[in-house]
Amino acid sequence: MFSKPTRNHISIVLEQIGAAGVVVLTFAYSAVYEAFTSGQNIFSKQFWLRLVYSVVGSQNETVAVIFGVAAVFVVLIPLWSLIRWYKTCFYIDGEHLVCERNTLMKKSSRLPLSSIATVNLERNIFERIVGTAKIKLDINSAATASQTDFTFVLSLEKAKALEAALLSAKTKEQTAAENKETVFAFTNAQAVRHVILSQPVVQYVGIGALAVIGMIFDEKVLGGDTFTRIVPVLGLSVFGWLAKIVMQIMSACQFKIERDENSIFISSGLLRKKNYSFEKEKINALTVRRPVLARLFGLAFAEVAVIGLGNDKKETPQISLLVKENELKKILAVCASDFNCTGERMPEHKTGLIAAMAKYLLGFGVLSVAAAFVWLPLCPVIILLGALFAVFSHKAKALCADENIFSYSQGFLSQKTCFFKYSDIQTLRFSTNSLMKRFGTGRITLSILSHSSMSIHNTVWAANSEFVKISQIVTK
């Protein structure tokens, strides 16, 4: 089907100009229709003045000229989008995907199918209405790790056919729906639980505490009335937060994990349907997260670092929702069996407590200064709380390494554990300072080929000897 040049669905033009452009074009069409029905000659000055006056609502000729210039650009943008759509095509040529654009400057891209990391199919509300779907392709490239490389908009039938054709040509075997095996299908109740228990309550509590201290400080010291003024803003913030939660729930509903011999397939979403597919060997890292609320119920979820999975619109690259630890192990045994570190867990070096104390006491020190204006006895309490945060944060950090996998853990409220294959680590650094250098310790930092938010990992403070052991394995 795709051996010959194929264009995107024409609805991509409407998506490119956006909702505002559609409104402007509709309004302009109404104005033009009204001017035409007036019976005046289309080539006369009076016709165009009447058209502009009816849109602008003013008979000032200067305003009319400015509006006319702006209207030209408004018309040219969708016109250029239409030309670009007509002059753009793609097709599969043997083992390559070819994309061509013959506009003012000819552009041709030839992508080896073997370099495609992920094939993602998604549908937003507009696309579901018009019966189309979006295919997003991403390749293993550090230069484009934070953006989608190729995007096609096709009818739903063609989009599914292209997805199947790419996967089939990539793996040199047919990837049919009947060959897929369901790994785990989450219920909508589990999706709601995941979103609610994954909320960053620590940040909310911190922001709330600062807001309360600020209001008390303003009323007691400055004699203001912050509470009355902040209530509408607070109400609007709560409404926005609830709306965000609803959208997150709708995105997490119908979350399903499937697999075949080589690939993983993830689908989710109610209004905006998303379908991700990637080869298991393309996974560059695994992260197991335990949010603070989820830890109360013994729940955790996992993310994977794959080029293209989770980089568009900063979406979370989840390979599961919150489940019991034993259920998560079963999912990972199927989807990411290579990321299992059998080495001994090594706590962070004792000097890491110095860095933790500096970090937390600085932040809590600023908060205590503000609290001193409200109630002086709060100061030592806040400082003590900062010291406790530093100790617990240091105790929660650890690293683990065996002959294949490097892993580190951090976080004493919301915890995370990251796993990396040595072969996927691009850079490994040992950062220290004048103080830590005296103890022969430094912080291990590594980078992988992934989305920008997951590419750099500042792990734990460790002895130089531990870094040497790990670096020797990485450089083999």
Image (cartoon, grey):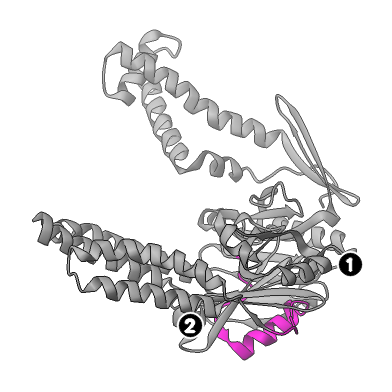
Q: Please count the marks in the image.
A: 2
Callout 2: 10 Å neighbours few (<14), some, many (20+)? many
Quadrant where the C terminus sits is: bottom right
Estimate the x, y position of residue 248 in percent, counting from the top left.
47, 67
> Which residue bears the numbered disc 1?
173
Estimate the x, y position of residue 94 in percent, counting from the top left.
91, 50
Name the residue located 75 percent from the left edge and 84 percent from the top edge: 342
Name the residue located 42 percent from the left edge and 67 percent from the top edge: 360
Q: Specify the label residue 123 is tagged with.
A: none
> Which residue bears the numbered disc 2?
294
Q: Nearer the viewer, residue 372 or 306?
A: 372
Estimate the x, y position of residue 412 in percent, counting from the top left.
49, 78
Marks 2/1: CA distance?
41 Å
Name the residue located 81 percent from the left edge and 46 percent from the top edge: 91
Q: Is residue 254 visible?
A: no
The span picked out in magenta is 317-344
Examine the image and state in which quarter residue 358 appears. bottom left
Q: Nearer the viewer, residue 52 or 463?
A: 463
From this viewpoint, which residue is outermost toward the left?
A: 223
Name the residue located 12 percent from the left edge and 58 percent from the top edge: 221
Q: Is residue 428 visible?
A: yes
Estimate the x, y position of residue 411 in percent, counting from the top left.
52, 75
Relative placement, left or right, of 96 versus 200 is right
Q: Earlier in the sequence, mark 2 or mark 1?
A: 1
